[in-house]
């Protein structure tokens, strides 16, 4: 697979014409502008308000540039957090011997 191809491709369900994620969604629409973020003492998010007219939007309607038919696109976002390799994590002042 060519490394220059986008990681996320959205296809028109009618004709198969392909779009990049950035063609159908603006980053500011996906992320929104959070405010009034409330966490408990352990860091768990209890509440998140959004600035007016800036809630994240994960759905859009689009008219295909190729076949001129309307289709819906919906994002399903996942994120994974992993620990940094101990050899390059300089925030930890101790190290394991084994």
Image (cartoon, rainbow, N blue to C red):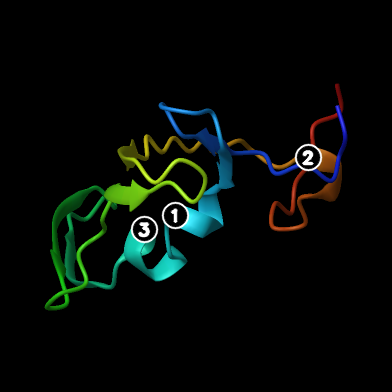
Residue 17 in percent (x, y) is at 56, 36
Res. 14 image quadrant: top left
Residue visible at 76% across and 50% down? 89
Which callout, 2 or 3, points to the residue nearer the camera? Answer: 3
> Please, what secondary structure does the residue beneath circle 3 have?
helix
Left or right: 85, with 44 as reference point:
right
**Which residue is denoted by mark 2 in the rendering?**
86
Closest to the observer, 52 or 5: 5
The answer to whether 79 is drawn above or below residue 36 in the figure is: above
Looking at the image, tell me whether mark 2 or mark 3 is earlier in sequence order: 3
Residue 22 in percent (x, y) is at 54, 57
Real-space CA distance between mark 1 and mark 2, rounded to the nearest whole angstrom: 39 Å
Left or right: 47, with 89 as reference point:
left
Q: Residues within 10 Å of mark 2 (few under 14, many from 20)?
A: few
Residue 21 in percent (x, y) is at 53, 49
**Which residue is denoted by mark 3 in the rendering?**
30
Which callout, 1 or 2, points to the residue nearer the camera? Answer: 1
**Which residue is denoted by mark 1 in the rendering?**
24
Real-space CA distance between mark 2 and mark 3, rounded to the nearest whole angstrom: 33 Å
> Please, what secondary structure does the residue beneath circle 2 have?
helix
Res. 93 image quadrant: bottom right
Instruction: Work out which quarter of the rendered image holds the C terminus and state it.
Output: top right
Residue visible at 28% across and 50% down? 60
């Amino acid at each position: 697979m060519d490394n220059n191809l986008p990681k996320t491709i959205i296809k028109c369900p009618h004709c198969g014409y392909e779009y990049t994620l950035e063609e159908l969604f603006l980053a500011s629409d996906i992320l929104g502008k959070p405010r009034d973020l409330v966490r408990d003492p352990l860091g768990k998010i209890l509440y998140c308000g959004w600035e007016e007219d800036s809630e994240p939007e994960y759905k859009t309607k689009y008219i295909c540039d190729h076949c001129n038919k309307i289709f819906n696109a919906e994002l399903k976002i996942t994120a994974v957090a992993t620990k940094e390799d101990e050899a390059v994590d300089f925030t930890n002042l101790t190290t394991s011997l084994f």
